[in-house]
Amino acid sequence: MTKGQSYEDAANRELHEELGIVMAITPVAKFLSETKDETEMAMLYKGVSEGPFMIDQRETFEVKFFNPNEIRILELSGGSLQSLQKAGVV
């Protein structure tokens, strides 16, 4: 996020930079994400896209799709887990 940029503008910019998509997003929750190493304010959005996705390899290492049952068995970072819990996925 850059100075003066809204959460929504930052989310849309990142979607375009990392996945090459433009899509409608809906705010889900704004919350404090805390782990033992960092604390940050997070804004979670929800959106749906069928692509096509144009992955920028300089921005994104890998993209995978998971169903909710597969997500539950992954080892997630504290921030990722908090986000998915807020979204009602896990």
Image (spheres, rainbow, N blue to C red):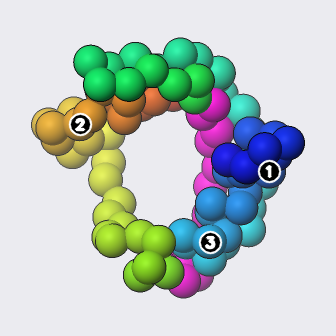
Residue with the mark numbered 2 = 76
The span picked out in magenta is 43-55
The amino acid beneath tag 2 is Leu
Residue with the mark numbered 1 = 9
Give how far across and how far down residue 76 sits, in percent. Answer: 23, 36
Can you say whether 26 is above or below 57 in the image?
Answer: above
Name the disc covering residue 36, or none.
none
Residue at image location 79% in from the left, 50% down from the top: 9
Disc on the earlier residue, 3 or 1: 1
Can you say whether 86 is above or below 69 in the image?
Answer: above
Between the C-alphas of marks 1 and 2, the distance is: 26 Å
Q: Reply yes or no: does residue 48 show up in magenta.
A: yes
Residue with the mark numbered 3 = 17
Q: CB atoms at circles 3 and 2 under 8 Å apart? A: no
- Residue 56 visible somewhere in the drawing: yes
Give how far across and how far down residue 25 sits, in percent. Answer: 73, 47
Disc on the earlier residue, 1 or 2: 1
Between the C-alphas of marks 3 and 2, the distance is: 23 Å
Q: Nearer the viewer, residue 33 or 3?
A: 3
The amino acid beneath tag 1 is Asp
Quadrant, the C terminus: top left
Between the C-alphas of marks 3 and 1, the distance is: 12 Å
Q: Examine the image and state in which quarter residue 77 appears.
A: top left
Q: Badge 2: how crowded within 10 Å, few (<14), some, or many (20+)?
A: few
Q: Reply yes or no: does residue 86 show up in magenta.
A: no
Q: Image check: 31 left or right of 68? A: right
Q: Secondary structure at mark 2?
A: loop
Residue at image location 54% in from the left, 83% down from the top: 54
Q: Badge 3: how crowded within 10 Å, few (<14), some, or many (20+)?
A: some
